[in-house]
Amino acid sequence: MTLVVAAFYKFVSLPDYIDKQQPLLSFCQSQGIKGTILLAPEGINATIAGERLAIDSVLKFLRSDPRLADLEHKESYTEEAPFARMKVRLKKEIVTLGLPEVDPNELVGTYVNPQDWNAVISDPEVLLIDTRNDYEVVIGTFKGAQNPQTQSFRDFPEYIKKHFDPTKHKKVAMFCTGGIRCEKASSFMMSQGFQEVYHLKGGILKYLEEVPTQDSLWEGECFVFDERVAVQHGLEQGSHEMCSGCGHPISEEDKVSSKYEEGISCPYCFDALTDDKRERLSEKKHQMELAKKRGL
């Protein structure tokens, strides 16, 4: 059965976000939906999966709130359920920058549609920044993009302050997986005095969905936060898998390494893996193999 994976977010004032948690969870569960929805005073952020009619019902339920009437979403498809359960979580921020004063509802950069993105980033005066974390960037990014080499989005403000100057870098373009981090990043940069700040509307996922492969400036695959691990042009499932030891995406090349052991370690975690964790992962792998043999 083909399942629909819907990703969406919206920065909007939700002072009653706590009250929305249980009704939303109950409705999603009644539709057989799995995934995660984050609610915060600043808005909503989610990736959910389910059958076509169920996804449509949840989106209709959300848009019945006038504040979410124009909620946009992106879709992809999978043959295997990417999530094990349904969660609606309450957060301080729907994407954690650690600066509550940064509010995309008040100040945000200029949105650029996927069809216009190539022209923007081909301008030699434009500083192109990938706002994602290092483990995401290494498997794919736009040609010529700066990699902040951050481990957390919280590290982004310090990276900008340390490396760039609004009096020297007149034009800045940024991108992320679905667009949400860029809204906060652009709001932050404008608050720091950067004047021309552009960001890819709908993020990498929308670009890969709408821009033909032959016209694309994207290189590699795009990391996604579900069981698919990565997607490529047309949002087709990519070739990367997830390391059970550290959660880092691993390529076919990584699997050739002597530090790779299926279900236990990869080149990114081999040296740091404790004996205790290695033993636990080995036992888990053993139990899964037994279950598979029994047809469970």
Image (tube, rainbow, N blue to C red):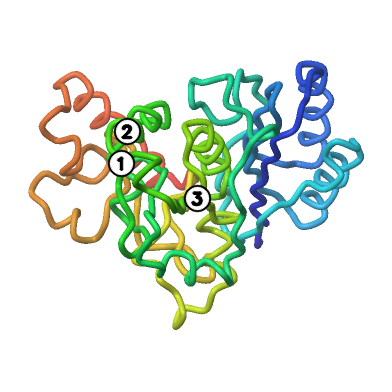
Dividing the picture into quadrants, the one containing residue 163 is top left
Residue marked by disc 2: 159
Q: Amino acid at mark 1?
A: Pro
Point out which mark residue 148 bears: 1
Q: Position of residue 188 (x, y in %)?
A: 51, 33
Which kind of residue does numbered mark 3 sit on? Thr
Q: CA distance from mark 1 to mark 2?
A: 7 Å
Choose top left, top right, bottom left or bottom right for residue 18. Answer: top right
- Residue 177's tag is 3
Residue 26 higher or lower than 78, as above or below: above
Name the element at disc 3: loop
Which residue: 85% across, 36% down? 67
Mark 2, residues whose alpha carbon is within 10 Å: few (<14), some, or many (≥20)? few
Q: CA distance from mark 3 to mark 1?
A: 15 Å
- Mark in the foreground, 1 or 2: 2
- Say what amino acid the circle numbered 2 marks: Tyr
